[in-house]
Amino acid sequence: MKKPSSILPARRWADSVMRHMDTTRKIAQLLMIRVYNPPSPEQAARVEHEIQDLGVGGIVFFQGDPVQQALLTNQYQSMSAIPLWVGIDGEWGLAMRLLGVQPFPKQMQLGALPDASLIYQMGCIVGAQCKRMGIQINFAPDADINNNPDNPVINDRSFGENKFIVARYARAYMQGMQEEGIIAVAKHFPGHGDTEVDSHQDLPVVDKTLRTLDTLELYPFRQLIRAGVKGIMVGHLHVPAIDSTSHMPASLSRKIVTGLLKQRMGYKGLVFTDALDMKGVTNYFQHGEAALQALLAGNDVLVLPENVEEAIDTIAAALRQHRLSMAYLDSKVRRILETKYQLGLAHWQPVDTTYLLEDLNRSVRSVTKLMDDSSFVVLGNDHQFLPFSPESPMRIAYVGVGLDTTQTDFARDLRAYHPVDTYFFPASSPWENIAPLAKKLKYDYDAVIVGVHRLNRYPAHHFGLSEAEILLIQQLQQEARTVTVLFGNPYALQDMHDGEAIVVAYEDDSLAYATAAALLFGRMEPGGRLAVSVSGRYQAGSGLTAWNRTRVVLPYVQPEQVGVDPGILKRIDTLAQEAIAAHATPGCVVLAARDGKIFFHKAYGYLDNGDTLPVQLNTIYDMASCTKVSATTLAAMRLYDEGKLNLDAGLGKYLPWLRGSDKAPLTIRDVMLHQAGLVAWIPFYKNTLYDGVHPDTVLYSHHRDPVHTVRVAENLYINPAYLDSMYMQIRNSKLIPGHRYVYSDNDFILMQKVVEAITGMRLDEYVEKTFYAPLGLTRIGFRPRSFASLNEIAPTENEKQFRLQQLHGDVHDPGAAMFGGISGHAGLFADAYDLAVLMQMLLNGGTLNGQHFLKPSTIQYFTGYRSDISRRGLGWDKPEKDRMKDPEPYPCASASPLTFGHTGFTGTCIWVDPAYKLTFIFLSNRVYPDGGANMKLIQMNIRGRIQQTLYDAMGVQAPKSQIGEK
């Protein structure tokens, strides 16, 4: 039969090489030897002898430094007469063996993923890692079905106990690697998952019928063979149902290697032995006999023989004794050489060590983050204990089981969402410490997060947990409201399966901590399913796939996922620190989302200049004039939507008390465009100070009483009768002549009254009922002390007149304060996340979470340019129409004309750009402690520069400056 043309060059090269090979070198070509990184002098001498003098076919690296391994690869390849093929165990990427390389999750975690797409990506990356290191063979994936929780060697290396998932995910991993030209070697045929003996130490027995093996253990291998896997590794397993020969490992059994794998299952690829120096073989076959038996069984590649020279001598003796034919040996050698040619080894190039570690780590962390986001498993939660609400007044404690007081990384991530008290219970803790700690946690806290750390990978000795640790966890699960976060093997749940909820987080590292914290506080949805059954309570496939709630969740993603350059985003860190260092603000929060996905959310600095309370991601800020759009304008948009608000009607139509004044005919349209002629603001408070500094003691009281019922600040209440006087001051104020744009707080004080007149509800009640509550927003609203504790709220000014106190939890704007903290122009408080949800509803055309709030046409109308004398929309601020003529374009150079938003006096801003589906939130308390006198945030243009950085990171070209053009 004529050979395909692609085979001919490989065959010619193999034949040309074989003509110069003696018997010793032919036998040696079947062997792959263990090499060390770095080697001792004795190890180096042995390896060089086996390569140069004996002519072994390949090398297998284990632990070591990547650059050193690359240099050793180059050295060994250069001294070998025939190119070596290089192998490695890289089941979770090269990090399994190489220092400094970032790891992928182990296969049991990957088995919890909802599909195999990320595993294929991982396979491609691992394949690229191998190519970069000069490796041609990766002994992965593990295709064992781990249906024995006590398995001491496979366990978390398996994709789980479901044969379909194991087959599908192993195939994806294999295909990704082979796409990159790497030989993937599936293992450990015919199945090592249901064993209780480590084959490194002795020979495990798989005591199953052939029918059971055929329907379960062999299934993944059959699927991989159909998919074209290039290598299969045969394990050191005694399988009496197939070969009853005493102590016969599958790896040395002709009935299994040739009879089952090659003939019955039709496998045509390369067959590798598991390491022949493992005691599962050497306990029963010595002095080279294992290598000979492996070859006789039908294996193609003999991996890590215990003694290379003995292996060669034993096989050579078998040739002389005609136990083995030269034709059989030649066929094996020729196949190996042809495969080496197809791998490009006939034209081998040295490994370049330049930027080697950087290349190996490229894309690993971003894919691992996606895997974590989709694989963490939430169990239980029958009473909807999770997710915790960041704004909840719950008293939460975290207990770090297995940790000491220096290991606070997970506690820090938890505190980014909510105040959390921290306790530690090291493995060395005595039993006597359990009772007092459990009692305190039970009675002093509403929720206890039990973090289980420092677990061993394998089940011996309860995964390394002490009896005291297990007892504490069990007692807390039974007596307190707990969520247990397991940073390790899910099989460990056999000792801790109670409590309100359990989260399986797999790895005990910083990425797992951040993901687990975000999951606990509802910043992401659960998605993982258990890959294995544990404790009899949770079966494989268990796990919540969504929180049972109405709260909207904007997912957190890596910047690259939404087309944003993370390197450019680092400038935001610099700008925030620049602002803090210049005392432009003590701290800030920056959030950016694209297409409904948050790709940047960071907190910087402190709530005050005392450096004691760091800003958190969920810190609540006084939004100042952002109230105009986040409350009042939204309300007006809804009423316009419903046909209840006529933009061209006069104020007098809705506010009878304005009739007869020059304010009555002012149209709603002009009021919302700030071109109705109302003065910018009225300092209401000044008329209430008896000496220009202190509040009038008749109008105000330091205590709430039947007369003074409206809170203005801490220990300061006003007579509500004075509020009518304030409205009359607006009614009687002089209008500014001419058709001019004058930004005015009074416009929106009146718009609040219009909304209230139409709805019959207070503004805060209306927006809460209409927008905030349906969206599940709980960290936005007026009068923030009603929904947040003070340490969650950023303080503002230390006021030297009027209120004469450090303002904290009360609105900064004095007029809004006199209105009781609820006004159309100021008074709203919020955190960045809830604002982002609110803005996403607008970006989505008025719909979010399956609910409809506004018509798309209404949003487009209100947020477009609607004035011929200003940049304004209806209520909304917009970019200057000719902003490129300014040295500092407003709000930034690259904002599209569709952009809408607002800024706040306290140092806040909200900007939404539909052209790029971008939401930008900046929150700060720049008025702390000196009020409006501190203009540095504005002078330094921090908000605009950060906003422009987002566009730069998206690759949006800024328009050309027109400064100087006429």
Image (cartoon, grey):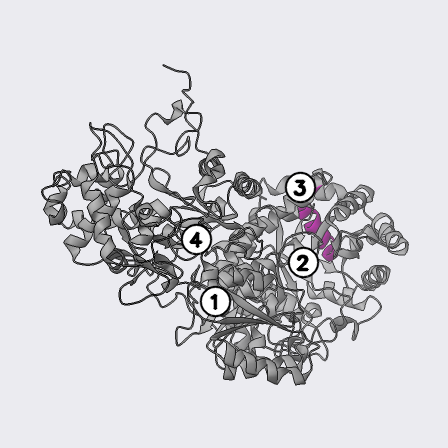
- Residue 821 can be seen, yes or no: yes
x and y percentages locating residue 546 in the rendered image: 39, 65
- CA distance separating discs 3 and 2: 25 Å
* Name of the residue lying farthest toward the top: 966
| Along the viewing direction, whichever of 888 and 510 lies nearer the viewer | 888
Q: Callout 1: few (<14), some (14-19), or many (20+) C-alpha neighbours within 10 Å?
A: some
Q: Secondary structure at mark 4?
A: loop
Looking at the rendered image, the disc whose residue lies closer to the viewer, 2 or 1, is 2
Say what amino acid the circle numbered 3 marks.
Answer: Gly
The secondary structure making up most of the magenta span is helix
**Dot in front, 4 or 3:** 4
Q: In the image, which disc is placed on residue 804?
A: 4
Q: Which of 38/430 is in front? A: 430
Sequence-first disc among 2 and 1: 2
User: Is residue 585 shown left or right of residue 345?
Assistant: left
Q: Earlier in the sequence, mark 4 or mark 3?
A: 3
Label 3 environment density (alpha carbons within 10 Å; few <14, some 14–19, many ≥20): some
Disc 4/disc 1 C-alpha distance (Å):
70 Å
Q: Which mark is residue 407?
A: none
Indicate the secondary structure of the residue bearing disc 2: helix
Q: Position of residue 769 (x, y in %)?
A: 25, 60
**The magenta stretch spans which residues?**
327-345
| Residue designated by label 2 | 96
Residue 164: image tag: 1
Going by the numbered disc 1, the residue's amino acid type is Phe
In this view, the residue in front, 213 or 25, is: 213
CA distance for labels 2 and 4: 62 Å
In the figure, residue 433 lies in which quadrant?
Answer: bottom right
Q: Answer yes or no: do the residues labelled 2 and 4 have beta carbons within 8 Å?
A: no
